[in-house]
Each structure stands twice: as structure tokens, then as C-alpha cells.
């Protein structure tokens, strides 16, 4: 199969900084290129070359611009090349333009969230028009697929889902020496470290976690909260710091952590907590923490329950707006470190078997093959 993947124009592939969607594209494309010819069209940035190839994986990079200019630049660069399938990531509005530029080729829209099919990015009606031109619509979880089917019942037969993965060679359990060295390097030795990683925005639920940490510290005085991630609004981070100070919670902000060092965030943690307050479509950080051998506590919402089996590979919180509910689950891990360790081992095995990029790539290829032109 000859697959063209069109990435959003904001961040290049592979991403140098941030870019969870672009990272997913890169990880999936790498694995699919083992058996298929994959071309990734994306933004050119910095010192990246306009074209690059690694075996069956090819990159075509063009300047960032309006949707029409970006897509037309891609078409010019690909003139004369043939494709059996086109995947558009997270931009349903591109479908009509791509349909005109690449007539006759099946189109898949890979949605990583509902952001671009709901206000303010789009109205549901406009999104329905855009998606109606797609051959397939792929969601990154059953939860998101179910949401799409409810929103667009006429397109139900076109909707599929694939679960995402973690890089199992990077996100792995550390040796005792690696864990000790990493904790010491970040000044986090001797404490019970509650870790959060993600964008620092209200729907991620960090205020709930800060209040939960205050309750945990009443029984585990060594508990410390560790937060990794960047924020769009510096004032929001200042507010979190004030909230932590008011609640007397020791707080270490790691700031933005490059993807190549993200495993260290999980390694310093005695538990990883994902207190999402919205319907998280998948929650990749949970799969990464599981792969890294860190016990996970997360909101029972959106696609997260598809990753974590409560009481087996992690702990889920149904009352996810309640700090005391999170504190109760965190304390279970703090009080019984043996049980927490066994849970982390089972979580690693679940990641190996269910949440790896190879599985994602294979599933996606099996979805596309019957539709691929050629």
C-alpha cells in the first residue's frame, strides 16, 4: 500500500518540541513503513530538509500557510507520484480540498480529539459536511468513535477506531540504579512523588490533584507533587503555584520536558496521576506511565478506561471532580508498596501486548487495505 499522510501545518514531523499529534504520526508511520510505502507531508521548519527518506518512509516538507496554500504546495511537490490511500490527521476541513487535488483516491480522516469538529473550531453541521467527503473516519479510542457515531449518525458505517501506543524501548521500567540516579538528579530523593504530565490547562484537572495531595500529606508527610508540562498562559501556572502554597503542598515544576527525556518524568514518580476533567479521547500519558512501570491513578472518563483496568493495571476514579476520591486511591498505593509494584508489573505487560505502536500500525493497515486504491 502507498499511503500519504497529511499532517497539520503547525508542527513538523518528527516534532522537535511538543506536538502529540505529530509524534503519533511519526510513530505510526515508522512502523507502517516496514511493510508499506509511507509518505508524510508536513510543515518545513528550522534546519529540516524539504525532502528526506528512511527506507520506505518518505518526508515531504513545505512552508506553513493557509489550508489551501499548504495543501497545494504538497500537491506540487508530489506531482507524478501515485497513492492508494490518503490519511488527513485532525483536519476534517481539508477533505474537500484534498478531494479536488487528489481525485479518485480514498481519504481517511484520523481524529485525535473532537477539537476540530466542535465549536469554536467548527460547527457540528460544517464538520458533517467535511467528513461526508471522507471514505473512512478513524478515532483513537472506542470512546471517541462512539462520540462521533452519536454526532454523525449518517456516517456511522465509516467510523473505525485504533488504540494508540507507547515507545516500549523508551518507556520501560528503570533499573534501581536508574531510578535512584534520576530521582537524585531532579532533587526528588526521599519523598513519595505524585507525578502529573501534560498541558497545564484547566480541563487537565491539576487543581483537583493539588487539593488531593494536601489530603494525602495528612497521612504521608513525605508526599510531594511533581508537575511536568508547558502552559499556554503563564498566569495559569502562577495560579497553580499559589494554590499549592495555600494548601501547603510541596510542588516541583519541571516545566516543558523534551520527548526524549519524558521517561524520566515517570521514573521519578511513585505514582502517576491523570485527573482529567473532560472526555479525554485516549490519554497517551497513561499508556506511557504504564509502559514505564509507574502505578497509575486516573479519571474514569472518556477513553481512559480502555487503557486501565481498575484494580488490575491501575486505579480509576469515578468521582473525578473530588480531591478526596483521588486522595483515597493514591493512598492505596502509598500504603501498600508491594501491591503497587505488582500492579505496575501487570500494567507494563498490558502496554507490551496492547499499547505499542506496532499494534497501532498493524490495525490501521488492516483497516485501510480493503479500501486502498490499487
Image (cartoon, helix red, strand yellow):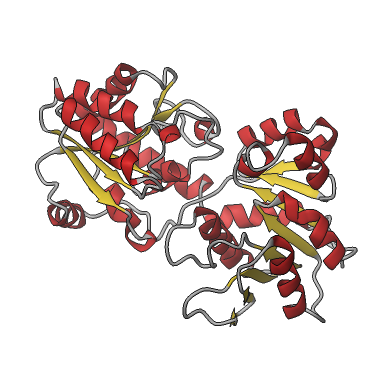
Residue at the right extreme of this rendering? 104
Which percent across, then down, holds residue 13?
Answer: 54, 67
Please give left or right for residue 63 compared with residue 122 in the image: left
Figure quadrant of residue 285: top left
**Quick check: can you spot residue 335?**
no
Q: Relative to 87, does residue 341 appear above or below in the rendering?
A: above
Locate residue 201, reporting x and y percent: 41, 39
Q: Residue furthest front?
A: 235
- Residue 58 lies, with reference to residue 293, above or below; the image says below
Q: How many marks?
A: 0
Q: Split into 4 quadrants, where in the image is the N terminus? A: bottom right
Q: Which of these two is toward me, 64 or 200? A: 64
The residue sitting at 15% across, 36% down in the picture is 250
Q: Left of 289 or right of it: where is 361?
A: right
Residue 318 in which image quadrant: top left
Which residue is located at x 23 percent, y 27 percent? 213
Residue 94 position, x and y percent, is 74, 56
Front position in the image: 77 or 374: 77
**Horizontal relation, residue 246 to residue 52: left or right:** left
Above or below 73: residue 109: above
x 68%, y 52%: residue: 91
Q: Nearer the viewer, residue 157 or 34?
A: 157
Q: Quadrant of the C terminus?
A: bottom right
Amino acid at each position: 500500500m502507498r499511503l500519504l499522510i497529511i499532517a497539520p501545518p503547525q508542527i513538523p514531523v518528527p516534532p522537535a518540541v511538543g506536538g502529540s499529534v505529530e509524534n503519533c504520526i511519526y510513530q505510526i508511520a515508522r512502523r507502517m513503513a516496514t511493510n508499506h510505502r509511507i509518505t508524510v507531508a508536513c510543515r518545513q521548519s528550522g534546519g529540516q530538509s524539504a525532502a528526506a527518506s528512511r527506507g520506505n518512509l518518505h518526508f515531504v516538507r513545505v512552508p506553513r500557510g493557509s489550508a489551501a496554500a499548504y495543501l497545494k504546495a504538497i500537491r506540487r511537490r508530489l506531482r507524478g507520484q501515485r497513492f492508494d490511500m490518503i490519511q488527513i490527521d485532525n483536519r476534517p476541513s481539508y477533505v474537500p480540498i484534498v478531494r479536488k487535488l487528489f481525485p479518485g483516491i480514498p481519504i481517511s480522516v484520523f481524529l485525535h480529539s473532537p477539537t476540530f469538529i466542535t465549536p469554536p473550531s467548527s460547527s457540528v453541521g460544517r464538520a458533517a459536511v467535511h467528513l461526508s467527503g471522507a471514505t473512512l473516519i478513524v478515532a483513537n479510542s472506542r470512546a471517541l468513535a462512539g462520540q462521533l457515531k452519536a454526532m454523525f449518525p449518517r456516517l456511522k458505517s465509516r467510523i473505525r477506531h485504533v488504540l494508540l501506543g507507547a515507545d516500549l524501548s523508551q518507556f520501560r521500567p528503570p533499573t534501581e540504579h536508574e531510578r535512584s540516579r534520576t530521582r537524585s538528579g531532579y532533587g526528588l530523593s526521599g519523598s513519595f512523588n505524585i507525578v502529573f504530565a501534560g498541558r497545564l490547562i484547566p480541563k487537565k484537572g491539576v487543581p483537583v490533584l493539588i487539593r488531593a495531595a494536601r489530603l494525602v500529606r495528612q497521612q504521608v508527610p513525605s508526599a510531594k507533587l511533581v508537575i511536568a508540562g508547558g502552559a499556554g498562559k503563564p498566569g495559569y501556572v502562577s495560579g497553580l503555584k499559589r494554590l499549592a502554597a495555600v494548601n501547603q503542598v510541596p510542588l516541583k515544576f519541571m516545566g516543558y520536558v523534551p520527548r526524549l527525556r519524558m521517561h524520566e518524568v515517570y521514573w521519578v514518580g511513585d505514582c502517576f496521576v491523570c485527573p482529567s476533567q473532560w472526555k479525554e479521547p485516549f490519554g497517551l500519558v497513561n499508556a506511557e506511565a504504564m509502559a514505564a512501570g509507574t502505578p497509575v491513578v486516573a479519571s474514569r472518563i472518556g477513553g481512559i478506561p480502555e487503557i486501565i483496568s481498575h484494580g488490575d493495571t491501575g486505579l480509576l476514579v469515578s468521582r473525578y471532580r473530588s480531591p478526596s476520591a483521588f486522595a483515597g486511591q493514591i493512598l492505596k498505593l502509598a500504603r501498600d508498596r508491594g501491591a503497587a509494584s505488582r500492579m505496575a508489573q501487570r500494567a507494563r505487560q498490558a502496554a507490551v501486548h496492547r499499547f505499542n505502536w506496532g499494534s497501532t500500525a498493524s490495525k490501521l493497515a488492516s483497516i485501510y487495505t480493503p479500501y486502498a486504491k490499487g
